[in-house]
Amino acid sequence: MFTGLVETKGLIDSFQKNEDGMILRLNHNNSFEVSINDSVSCNGVCLTVVRTDKNSFEVQLVNETLDRTTAEFWKEKDELNLERALLPSTRMGGHFVQGHVDCVTKILKIKHFDKSSTWTFKMNDDIEKYIVEKGSIALNGVSLTVASKDKNSFDVALIPHTIELTTFGNLTIGDSVNVEVDILGKYIENFLGHIK
């Protein structure tokens, strides 16, 4: 479980494809300490650390993950948003993010202001009912608020701090992002579906 508050960016050092999927090696700064078996959100994808040293760690991505996320497009020198799993003592500044990607969508438009910006994303039919204006959404693992919702798209507003801290500063129109809708909506839908 995560909060969607990105701690740092990691740089893909190498990846090795195998029949099970891919082993990914990420470099990070010294303050981002992880251990084997830790869960780390990498661009919103919950992955398990399988090897680590002082400035890097490795994670295993299975084919299911590659098929459902933007991970299949990752390459050497790409930056990823990183967040370690939530601790019981952590302030809950974002929202509950599982790292279980619901779908991949594309950036349709970016409107820049002085330093902030509004980003428009394509809204897939399968997630439309879970997206609520002023509700929470995780994009590439970043906890954001839905600023507005139209028939086939939704907008989020990014403050300068978010653009600087995350990989959003590297993205442009047409790029794909991982989407995780707020888990609360899915639980409510499931519960109501069992009421007769």
Image (cartoon, grey):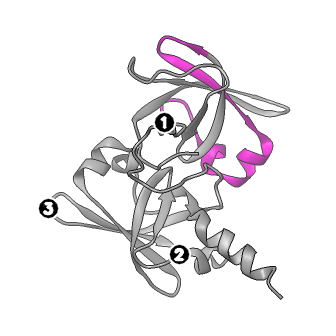
User: Is residue 2 one of those drawn in magenta?
Assistant: no
How many residues crowd around disc 1 within 10 Å: few (fewer than 14), some, or many (20 or more)? some
Q: Tell me: residue 40, above or below residue 44.
A: above
Q: Which mark's residue is nearer the viewer, 2 or 3?
A: 2
Tag 2 secondary structure: loop
- Tell me the amino acid under the disc marked 2: Ile
How many residues crowd around disc 3 within 10 Å: few (fewer than 14), some, or many (20 or more)? few
User: Is residue 76 one of those drawn in magenta?
Assistant: yes
Which one is earlier in the sequence, the residue at label 1 or at label 2? 1
- Tell me the amino acid under the disc marked 3: Asp
Instruction: Give the residue drawn at x 79%, y 42%.
Output: 63
Q: Where is residue 181? Give x, y as percent.
A: 57, 65
Q: Tell me: residue 24, above or below residue 183.
A: above
Residue hosting label 3:
114
Q: Where is residue 132? Give x, y as percent.
A: 49, 78
Q: Where is residue 184? Give x, y as percent.
A: 59, 67
36 relative to 89 in the view: left or right:
right
Q: CA distance from mark 2 to mark 3?
A: 27 Å
Question: Is residue 133 something one can see in this rendering?
Answer: yes
Q: Where is residue 137? Give x, y as percent.
A: 49, 64
> From which residue to which does the magenta span run?
52-80
Residue hosting label 2:
131
Q: Tell me: residue 62, above or below residue 141.
A: above
Which one is earlier in the sequence, the residue at label 2 or at label 3? 3
The numbered mark at residue 78 is: 1
Q: Are marks 2 and 3 in contact (CB under 8 Å)?
A: no
Q: CA distance from mark 3 to mark 1?
A: 27 Å
Q: Which mark's residue is nearer the viewer, 3 or 1?
A: 3
Q: CA distance from mark 1 to mark 2?
A: 29 Å
82 relative to 195 in the view: left or right:
left
Which one is earlier in the sequence, the residue at label 3 or at label 1? 1
Specify the quadrant that holds the C terminus.
Answer: bottom right
